[in-house]
Amino acid sequence: MSDDGKDPLGKMFRGNEEFRQTDFVPNITYWKGIVSGQQPKILWIGCSDSRVNPERITGSAPGELFIQRNIGNAVPLQDWNFTTVLEYALMNLKVEHIVICGHSDCGAIKALDIEDSDYYYIPVWLNNAREAKHRVDSQMKKPVTPEEIHDRYQRIEKENVRLQLEHLKAHPLVKKVCRERRIFFHGLYFNIHDGRLTRIE
Ligand SMILES: [Zn+2]
């Protein structure tokens, strides 16, 4: 898992060779089976955070998850990147399940507390999640101890998943498809402290 930091690309190519020998070649029949096309049943919307790799934390095989990752696992109604992924997933792949996965220690959620920043784009993007912070802060007293501060962030991370599910269900494309067939929505939360993935009710 360690990297000497001197040649990260070299580490990636060595990792690729190891992947070929220990995974690709032994499973060549599976790989040949998916060459002609993908048929994932799940659209996964998650955070870009490098510690939350969807396939790795769920044991999913190539071809099983169609993935959109962005800062703060957001569902931005006005974003073309997001909407094209959603359109392809619903109209072409005809996914049956849509997952929104938040996670602990999310930098996007912490950044909601920064009022003066030198960044141009991130604060605007984070407006997609700001309502989650307002909801949680209106329901609890100001945190003081490290435990209370951590608890507040976890609450906002989870509330943000609920908020993005609301955005998703309000999306015109989703509303259109839901009139034609059943789509299952799932809010999930990955805890980096224990590696556990849980449902958000
Ligand atoms: Zn994150």
Image: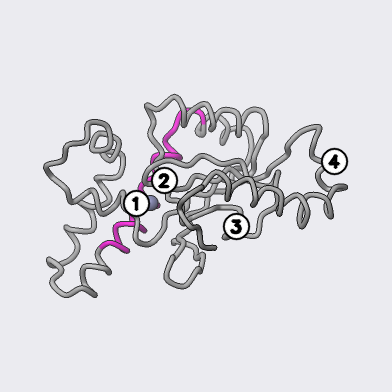
Q: Secondary structure at mark 2?
A: loop
Q: Residue furthest front?
A: 6
Residue tagged 4: 32
Q: Earlier in the sequence, mark 2 or mark 3?
A: 3
Question: Which badge, 4 or 1, comes first in the chain's sequence?
Answer: 4
Q: Tell whether 56 sits left or right of 136.
A: right
Q: Amino acid at mark 3?
A: Arg
Residue appearing at x 55%, y 43% in the figure = 9
- 56 left or right, relative to 198: right
* Residue 201, percent from left and from top: 44, 62
Q: Which residue is mark 2?
A: 73
Disc nearer the start of the sequence (1/2) = 2
Where is residue 79? Give x, y as percent.
40, 27
Residue 56: give its label.
3
Q: Earlier in the sequence, mark 1 or mark 3?
A: 3
How far apart marks 4 and 3 lie (CA) works out to: 21 Å
Please check the rendered image and state whether residue 94 is part of the magenta-colored stretch, yes or no: no
Labels 1, 3: front one: 3
Q: What is the C-alpha distance between the residues marked 1 and 3?
A: 23 Å
Point out the tag, 4 or 3, that comes first from the N-terminus: 4
Q: Specify start and end residues of the magenta stretch as a single range.
A: 153-173
